Amino acid sequence: MSNKFYFLVFFYISIFLKLSAYNNPVNTGFYPDPSICRVGDDYYLVNSTFEYFPGVPIFHSKDLINWQQIGNVLDRPSQLPLKNTLPSDGIYAPTLRYHDGIFYMVVTLVNSGQEKQNFYVTSTNPAGPWSEPIFVNQSGIDPSLFWDEDGKTYFVSNRGLTFNTERGIYQSGIDIKTGKRLTEPKLIWKGTGGNYPEGPHTYKKDGFYYLLIAEGGTMYGHMVTISRSKNIWGPYESCPHNPILSNRNAYEKLYGTGHGDLIQAHDGSWWMVHLGFRTPQVLGRETCLAPVKWSEEGWPIVNNNGTNSLFNNTETLPLKPFPAKSVRENFNSAKLGHEWISLRNPEMRNYSIANGFLSLAGSKYTIYDLESPTFIGRRQTNFNFTATTLIDFNPKMENEQAGLLIEMTNRFHYQFVISKSGNKRFLKVIYTLGDLKNLAGEVVLKSGLVNLRIIGDKKNYTFQFSQDNEPFQTVGKLNIQFLSAEVTGGYNGVVLGLYATGNGLESTSTAVYDWFDYEGMKE
């Protein structure tokens, strides 16, 4: 029988049955710093995006496990100016909340040499459009909002009026209509002593104000801690079994668990979304899910033992999966799918979709420049994948290149590009690792269209091509470890996609892509 038949059977059975296990991450690939809110039996989730545009993807779910992207919150340059933004700067740790019929997304914009900017945008529809930013005069990163039962609104971040104040969790009262502070920021908790206390979220339950934060940095020592108080201004009492989540001493293949957000489901159960990563760390920090119970003393217990796993043997909400997304992007719509992103604010005159083709005009900028080169990509969401495209590109000048790109940062990336030398057209595999740039393989192409393919696994990226329906041939192979965060530093995951450049000059030749396939395989 067809896969469609089995999907429908599973879909209708899962509506009525709770399953007893699920796999982490629930959202694979470069989706860090998750924040969640619920409206009825609908769940919405957002993530950090750093230097990429549009910013802050927003997802919808009915079961906390299956997620479908419905938009990007910051999809206009007026909301998200990213000029000269360094890798891993830009958008930090959004918080998503819903209050009195309005969705709020509050976030930090980080740009080198400037004071951190905290702002929020609003919408009555989580799919957008979202408002222009409303700024709050409080420093720090990872802001969050909380509404008390008396209608007052509170703003928390990890600094006071400037970034030079003592690190900890600061709170002020604000006017939610204008963003104006109504009180001075007050330091309400320093955490448990772990470095980098950040990512604060406030909740109220059974008469207590609970303050959840991240500590320990966002690598192997990451953790989630919590405190509580009867007064929203404190003093806050630390949970006796902090950290309530950390895999730093766990024998698990899920690392760096931290930066969580709590949610009570519509059936009364409690859950935490948080980030974690798998190694080698090319996929970035991913969105994970853990069940939560409350002790008799009123403290949350995450996944029974304060750790989380790639496989969780626990009862879930009734599963309501979405139809599988197509492997192929045909470029038949005037707009690309929500998953496509660019570096910084793209120069739209260099991008065109018409008659089922995507055309890219290379600018003078390269991927190495801290600008917005002509590049449109999507996150690598599987260790094992195949990405393929059909390109028509005949460069007139030797400086012009176009093809596929695997990018971790501007200084760490692999190119699979067509270029010209003399009267010949070449296909090249080029690696850039910091200050080291070299050719890893090349072939001479015949005239005509070219199929480009990248095959990924846990060890290598393999670069292949085909012309005239001939079998694919390998041009080169590069180790994925050199694009891992352990080597490159920073907070991102690999993004791969379509690229064109004039290498210092405006390109006189246009690269035309017929389609792009991304097929991920389970490990």
Image (spheres, helix red, strand yellow):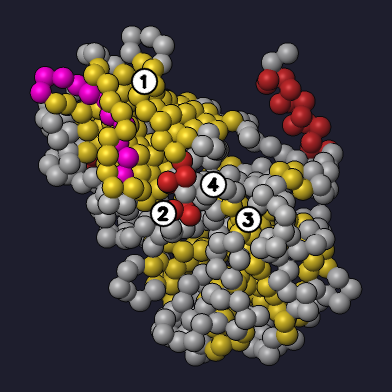
x 62%, y 63%: residue: 258
- Write down the residue under mark 3: 255
Q: Which residue is disc 1 drawn over?
A: 465
Label placed on residue 280: 4
Q: Earlier in the sequence, mark 1 or mark 2?
A: 1
Considering the image in quadrants, where does the C terminus appear? top right
State which tag comes first along the sequence, 1 or 3: 3
Query: Which residues are drawn in magenta?
Result: 422-432
The number of numbered badges drawn on the structure is: 4
Query: Is the Cβ of the residue at disc 3 closer than 8 Å to that at disc 4?
Result: no
Q: Secondary structure at mark 2?
A: helix
Q: From the viewer's perspective, tell me whether residue 377 is left or right of residue 349.
A: right
- Identify the disc placed on residue 488: 2
- Tell which circle, 1 or 4, labels the residue nearer the N-terminal end: 4
Q: Residues within 10 Å of mark 4 (few under 14, many from 20)?
A: some
Q: Amino acid at mark 2?
A: Thr
